[in-house]
Amino acid sequence: MKVSEQDLTYQRELIWNNCVNILVDILDDKKYKFMEDDIILRRQKKFIDTTNIRGKNKYKSVNILKTYLKTEDKGLAEQVFWNTVRNKTS
C-alpha cells in the first residue's frame, strides 16, 4: 500500500507537534519535572515508531530534543529548537 505525500506530511507534523508538546511541558514543569532525559527521549521515539514513517531523518526531532536536554545554554538550544520546528512544519 502506497502512502501519499500528503499523509507523510501530516505524519511529520504530528511528530513535530508531539515534540513541541513535550518541550512545552518541560518548560512548564508539568509532568516531566522529575523524569530522566532518557525517558523523555524514549517517549518521542515511541511516538515516531507508532506512525510507521520511513526516512532517514525521522528521528531529527529526537536529536533536537536531546540537544535541548543536554546543553547548558538553554536559551540558545531553545532558539534552535523553535527555528527547526518552524522550518519543518511550514
Image (cartoon, helix red, strand yellow):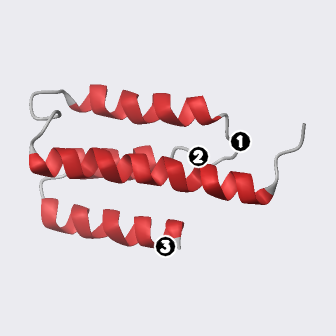
Q: Residue 87 carries which label?
A: 3
- Which one is in front, 43 or 4? 4
Q: What residue type is labelled 2?
A: Lys
Measure the C-alpha gap from mark 1 to mark 3. Answer: 20 Å
Which residue is denoted by mark 1 in the rendering? Answer: 54
Q: What residue type is labelled 3?
A: Asn
Residue 76 at what x, y percent from top left?
20, 68
Residue 60 visible in the displayed image: no
Q: Specify the quadrant of the image occupied by residue 53.
A: top right
Which residue is denoted by mark 2 in the rendering? Answer: 58
Q: Specify the quadrant of the image occupied by residue 43.
A: top left
**Secondary structure category for the residue under label 1:** loop
Alpha-carbon neighbours of circle 2 within 10 Å: few (<14), some, or many (≥20)?
A: some
Measure the C-alpha gap from mark 1 to mark 2. Answer: 7 Å
Q: Which amino acid does label 1 sit on?
A: Arg
**Secondary structure category for the residue under label 3:** helix
